[in-house]
Image (cartoon, grey):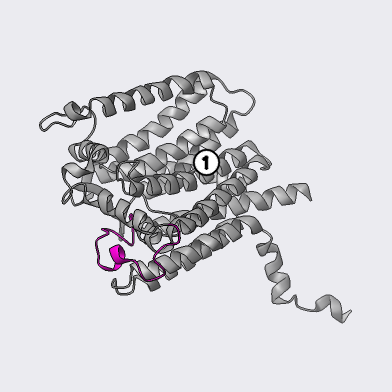
């Protein structure tokens, strides 16, 4: 009888919680976190406590991931509408009486200063996954139109701030849900073709389109300048083209094996701008070279493939769409950041997941990982 009243051990209490952790996904994150800490230690050598702060942000993201992993997907679905409406309301509030820094109105003081657009990185896929779940089995073209409107409202408000990087991430997350919900290729191919034609025209007539005084419709001046700088950074090597040129020099100088840990001259002589945030990939490439880049890309690829596998095996439509969209957020982060540092995409404010410094982005990543862990756990419970 005494054994019946024995208190469970700490291990027995933690076992149900740890069940939510997907081993392969956690392993991929561990590899990326190690790479991030090494790179931050080197690139942030003269940034005071930046390395310690980066480690603290990782721990915070880990705690958030652990907590969210315990929340069932059905419970997550109940947060979709309130979180989306709150995020959109805050974006409207930013447009009316937000805080302006460096020409951009992206922040608002609600007791603490926050950037509401970050909320939409998670709220947008949640909302659209909820929308399609409610219409499972009876999807009509009108449902996709409504989904597009739900997506375009926050994206338009974020672009108005202006914040091209965050709007791109929110747009990517929303389009992923719409695509995975079964959007016809007949509707996907025409915009893709128009985009390709537009890109060819821009490259072909770069001299005229980027001539001084020529104004592009829709885009802000700084966005037009970023595209023109991408096409020919040598036009302003000490100004707008400096970031791209120095990033490419650092990547190329790393060679196959890299210069070695703490040996990056472009990094330590401070030629690389924003070397702990947006351009940290250049610092990493210089010290770890092509082999280091292959390791990093393979780690991200493994994370993305594991996330898509979780999506494929998810028990409900909501879980499948949400897991797929969260996974594509990680892909978009990595692809855009590496692309802009390498000089194949315009420079936008998109960090490299787990590598770049930034508390807000790390919290968002922790939330995304927690959601994937939660969906993986739900799959195991259904199978058992």
Q: Closer to the camera, 31 or 380?
A: 31
237 lies left or right of 13: left
**Quadrant assignment, res 228:** top left
Residue 249 position in % (x across, y down): 30, 54
Read off the magenta span.
256-279
208 lies left or right of 146: left
Q: Closer to the camera, 83 or 191?
A: 191
* Residue matched to label 1: 325
**Quadrant assignment, res 281:** bottom left
Residue 103 position in % (x across, y down): 18, 48
Residue 199 position in % (x across, y down): 33, 28
Q: Quick one: which residue is furthest to the right in this view?
A: 1
Q: What kind of secondary structure does the magenta stretch mostly adopt?
A: loop
Q: Closer to the camera, 68 or 239?
A: 239
In the figure, 294 relative to 331: above or below? below
Q: Quick one: which residue is furthest to the bottom in this view?
A: 2
In the figure, 219 relative to 109: above or below? above
Quick check: can you spot residue 83? no
Residue 157 is one of the magenta-drawn residues: no
């Amino acid at each position: 009888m005494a054994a019946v009243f024995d208190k469970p051990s700490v291990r027995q209490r933690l076992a149900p919680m740890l069940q939510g952790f997907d081993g392969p996904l956690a392993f991929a994150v561990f590899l990326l976190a190690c790479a991030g800490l090494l790179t931050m230690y080197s690139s942030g050598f003269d940034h005071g406590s930046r390395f310690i702060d980066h480690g603290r942000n990782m721990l915070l993201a880990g705690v958030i991931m652990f907590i969210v992993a315990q929340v069932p997907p059905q419970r997550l679905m109940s947060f979709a509408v309130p979180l989306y409406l709150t995020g959109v309301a805050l974006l409207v509030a930013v447009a009316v009486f937000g805080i302006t820094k460096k020409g951009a109105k992206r922040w608002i003081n609600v007791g603490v200063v926050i950037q509401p657009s970050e909320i939409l990185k998670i709220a947008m896929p949640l909302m659209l996954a909820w929308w399609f779940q409610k219409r499972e089995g009876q999807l009509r073209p009108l449902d996709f139109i409504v989904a597009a409107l739900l997506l375009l409202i926050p994206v338009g408000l974020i672009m108005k701030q202006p914040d091209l990087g965050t709007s791109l991430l929110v747009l990517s997350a929303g389009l992923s849900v719409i695509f995975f919900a079964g959007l016809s290729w007949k509707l996907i191919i025409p915009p893709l073709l128009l985009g390709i034609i537009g890109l060819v025209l821009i490259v072909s007539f770069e001299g005229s389109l980027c001539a001084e005084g020529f104004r592009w419709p829709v885009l802000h001046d700084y966005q037009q300048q970023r595209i023109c700088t991408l096409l020919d950074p040598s036009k302003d090597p000490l100004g707008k083209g400096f970031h791209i040129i120095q990033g490419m020099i650092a990547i190329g100088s790393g060679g196959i094996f890299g210069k070695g840990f703490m040996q990056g001259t472009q990094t330590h002589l401070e030629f690389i701008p924003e070397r702990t945030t947006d351009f940290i990939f250049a610092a990493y490439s210089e010290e770890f070279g092509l082999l280091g880049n292959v390791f990093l890309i393979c780690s991200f690829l493994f994370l993305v493939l594991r996330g898509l596998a979780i999506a494929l095996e998810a028990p409900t439509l909501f879980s499948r769409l949400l897991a797929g969209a969260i996974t594509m957020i990680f892909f978009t982060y990595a692809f855009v950041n590496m692309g802009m540092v390498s000089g194949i995409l315009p420079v936008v404010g998109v960090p490299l997941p787990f590598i770049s410094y930034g508390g807000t982005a790390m919290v968002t990543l922790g939330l995304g990982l927690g959601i994937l862990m939660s969906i993986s756990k739900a799959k195991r419970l259904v199978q058992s």
